[in-house]
Amino acid sequence: MSCTTILAGKNATFDGSTMIARNDDSPSGQFTAKKFIIIKPSEQPVKYKSVLSHVEIELPENPMRYTAVPNVLHNEGIWAASGVNEENIAMTATETITSNERVLGADPLVEYHAAEDGKPEHVGGIGEEDLVVLVLPYIHSAREGVLRLGSLLEKYGTYEMNGIAFQDVNEIWWLESIGGHHWIARKVPDDAYVVMPNQLGIDSFDLHDALGRQKEYMCSADLAEFIQNHHLDLSLSNQLNPRDAFGSHDDADHVYNTPRAWFMERYLNPHTSRWDGPGADFCPASDDIPWCRIPEKKITVEDIKYLLSSHFQGTPFDPYATYGKADMRGAFRSIGINRNDFMALIQIRPYLPEAFRTVEWLAFSSNAFNALIPFYTNISITPTYLSDTSGDVSTDNFYWSSRIIAALADAHYGKCINHIERYQSAVLSCGHAIINKYDQMLATASGNAQIQALCETANQETAGMVKEKTQAVLNKVLYESSCLMKNSYARSDS
């Protein structure tokens, strides 16, 4: 699965929140409808079985309620993707990442093999389909999320390389799987942000801390021996660089992955480094773009939405550009692409009571054309405009309405983009206003039942607002697109 992730520590954001955000993208050649729901403890399985790998796992007792953004169709499993549990612990899974032949030869992926020719079935490991369901309902801190997932990887293995973010009000941790059973994790510095574009990203690692105090690093227990036995450390200074040891630097990365990191850091640190021209410190093909950096200004919700919607605006590589060399437009894989299924940004606000401090911002379909809306997570139900999505195209839900708008607007970008930009700005402004209004109301509410009811009312108001504005912009882009049909004719029959 192709995705893009941004993580921002509490001292790097505009209001002191920890923020984790990710685009969930479909594989090439398909579009995966998504919905926003609540999983209650009674709905959580006691024994989990993966659809893709057939692995079966006994789950702990007493799961917590959590939000999820699963696939509408479960033919390939749940794919819960992103969520927040009732203790304000969040998780987004996953960012598919890369590896190399040395790692995969030393610790092969645990792949499923069906029974055939008299041989029994060989179950696979865990993967993106499974991770949120297996971890999020049972963890009470971001650090605990790393430890639970790490233990599952060591026991069951995985059939793919993934990066997973865990978040609480104080910390963000990023875990990367290594081969079939190994893993590393690093705490995001409080004053920094992280960008992840489908590559193994961590570029420095303190093994001594990871195998000792675990203050800022964690890893599988035998990682030092694994590295030594298989000669994986490529550094000349004994300073482990996981990106070199466990990741990839191939030609495809320089078209598909590294340009996304280049654009995101170019936006957040425009003056810290030189990004363009023959003397640039970093270019789209650079393999050493930092995993984390201190931004030049504090990061907002709008910054993250812009970046996860981006298509190399202001550069020669923008596929919608009307300037520059035509053969450079679309040269690199954009962040905001047609196969975006949804974007989630989880904001945990330390200055508010636990009962309503977390907001999960959501957008569906291609981020270049969609709108981002906020929802409180202390809820027992989600609005039908986001939860009652089917596999059939319909304007009755946010996912399909957003996908229709994107398909129409993309074909006639120059005529439609002004409508899209006004829509996106209006929805974000109204979303902030609704949260501000209900934050004040919630501050005087008494008891969790009243708070939860108010959170659900706020969410319903948000859904009603975005439904109205989405229908209005659909009307406009359909009109613009209809006027530009190839069979249009100016003479009127009346």
Image (cartoon, rainbow, N blue to C red):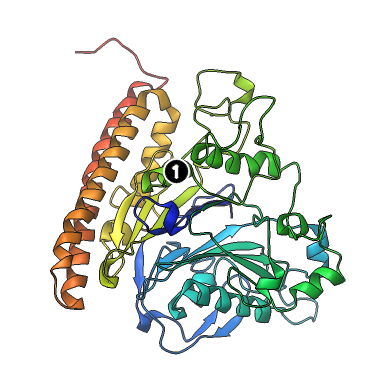
Looking at the image, residue 197 lies above or below residue 245: above
- Would residue 454 be visible to someone looking at this image? yes
Count numbered badges in the picture. 1
**Residue extending furthest toward the bottom:** 61
Depth check: give the residue in front, 413 or 279. 279
Assign the C terminus to one quadrant of the image: top left
Instruction: Report helix, strand or loop for mark 1.
Output: loop
Picture coordinates of residue 196 (x, y %)?
58, 52
**On screen, 347 above or below 298?**
below
Indicate the quadrant containing the N terminus: top left, top right, bottom left or bottom right.
bottom right
Q: Residue at x 20, y 60 (%)?
A: 439
Label 1 environment density (alpha carbons within 10 Å; few <14, some 14–19, many ≥20): many
Q: In this view of the protein, which residue sits in the foreground, 424 or 299?
A: 299
Q: Which residue is mark 1?
A: 366
| Image position of 225 with respect to 488: above or below | below
Examine the rendering and report whether any part of residue 388 can be seen: no
* Vertical relation: 212 (above or below) 349: below
Q: Decide if residue 332 is on the left or right side of residue 287.
A: left
Q: Give the farthest residue toward the top.
A: 491
Quarter assignment of residue 241: bottom right
Residue 492 locus on image (x, y percent): 25, 12
Residue 146 coordinates in the image, percent (x, y): 56, 73
The picture places residue 133, in percent across and down from the top left corner, at 48, 74
The type of residue carrying mark 1 is Ser
Residue 231 quadrant: bottom right
Residue in view at x 66 percent, y 82 percent: 155
